[in-house]
Amino acid sequence: MFLLKLAFLNIGRNPRRSIITVLAVGVGLAALIFLWGFSDGTNEQMRENVIRLLTGHVQIHALDFERSLSPELTVPDGSAVLEKLKTLPHVIAVTERVKCEALIGTSEKSRGILLTGIDPIREAQVTDLKNHMKEGEFLGSTEHRKVILGSRLAQKLQLHIGDKVVVMTQAIDGTLAGYSYEIKGIFHTGSQVLDEVSAYITFESAQELLSVGHETHEIVIRLASRKAIPSFLGQVKQITNAEQHEILTWNQIIPEVEQWVQWSEAIIRTILLAVMIVIGVSIMNTVLMSVFERTRELGVMMAIGTTPTQVIRLILLETFILQLFGIALGLVAGYCVTFYFGKVGIAFPELEQAFSRSYMSTVTYTRVEPFHVIQSIITLLILTSFIGLYPAWKAGRMEPIKAIYRP
């Protein structure tokens, strides 16, 4: 208790220097919390954009369909599997799709696309594509000769609402199949992958185009959350056949998203280490100056019986107290800023072109992940405590006589 009172007394001797040190720790920690919040918010949005715009949480195909997109690889017992999926826990919605590579064009231009046949009602329950219509309207259930296109695709082909296009592809029997479709809508998601190569028609139209009868190529499942995926996978394996069905999670279908997340977190950790070193040096400088100013006092303390170990403990205690005040300030400031931008968002409209190559949104909503905050605090405590050992060691090695008569 005596050392604690003495530590507070010593910290209060030079309030300006102590406040500057506390602010350095607080601002550094607040900046780290915000950086983690920005990174976590961006990463979370990328994951959710992929799930809500394209993949759902889990997909079921015939073996090798995702790689080859061969029209004859329909889901074995697709209807039965679909009905069983609806009864499983955590399942919010299920839909089915028919997919193929196709050629879309007019009399002047043509481009290769990924054509997807969807059930408009069920698709809207699984993905958010309907909410991204830029022009026109989303597909209706009974519109068998309508198509919606990505904005970049429409721009490259110079197409507008009401224009006619021809879609051609290889049917299940190997023959060339093609129909004329009217453009009903143009969607814009901000993702180059979707907006430049994607087109959607109704599920029945796609079955007719590919001559697959009542078969389906893809079953898409939306769950309550990503956390439910491991539990769901254990259940879905009981209603599927491993020799016939391929079960893929969203990050297996588009693995580059998690690769980007790992890369961005590596950058944040590098910045975290640099900030920690700056904060640590700041604290060491403060404590070292305090030791120099109190050289005679420390010499007197050691002369009357204070042991070097007690002196070292006193200096480390002062360092720890400064850290605690700085951490408390940083937590309050960091959480306030992060929660604020978690509500209003940070907009980057001028970066849409750059973001379009990934699944990043032009508006980022920060979020606080407790794990990263705790990780930052522990790293800060360990590093700054280690750096604080030098002035404490220097104080403990003083010779009382030389310290007392130091000019």
Image: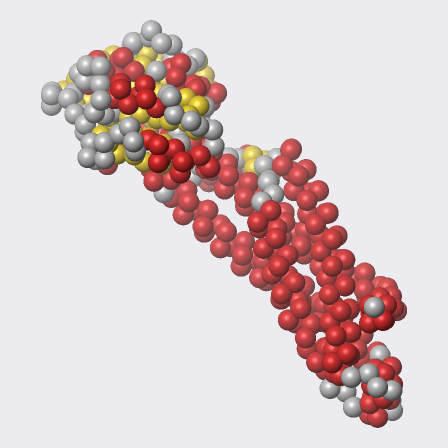
Quadrant location, the C terminus: bottom right
Q: Position of residue 183 (x, y in %)?
A: 35, 14
Task: Look at the image and tell me whether residue 170 can be seen.
Answer: yes
Quadrant location, the N terminus: bottom right
* Render colour scheme: secondary structure
Task: State the residue at coordinates (86%, 68%).
Answer: 5
**Residue 402 is drawn in which quadrant?**
bottom right
Q: Is residue 394 above or below residue 384?
A: below
Which residue extends farthest top?
A: 142
Task: State the residue at coordinates (60%, 40%).
Answer: 366
Task: Look at the image and tell me whether residue 159 can be seen.
Answer: no
| In the image: residue 312, left or right of residue 378 | right
> Which of the pair 358/365 is nearer the observer?
365
> Which of the pair 347/225 is nearer the observer?
225
Q: Position of residue 26 (x, y in %)?
A: 72, 55
Task: State the residue at coordinates (61%, 43%).
Answer: 368
> Which of the pair 406/396 is nearer the observer?
396
Q: Is residue 268 above or below residue 243?
A: below
Q: Is residue 221 above or below residue 277?
A: above
> Which of the pair 155/183 is nearer the observer?
183
Q: Is residue 149 above or below residue 379?
A: above
Task: State the residue at coordinates (29%, 10%).
Answer: 145
Q: Position of residue 156 (x, y in %)?
A: 35, 26
**Residue 389 is drawn in which quadrant?**
bottom right
| In the image: residue 268, left or right of residue 316 | left
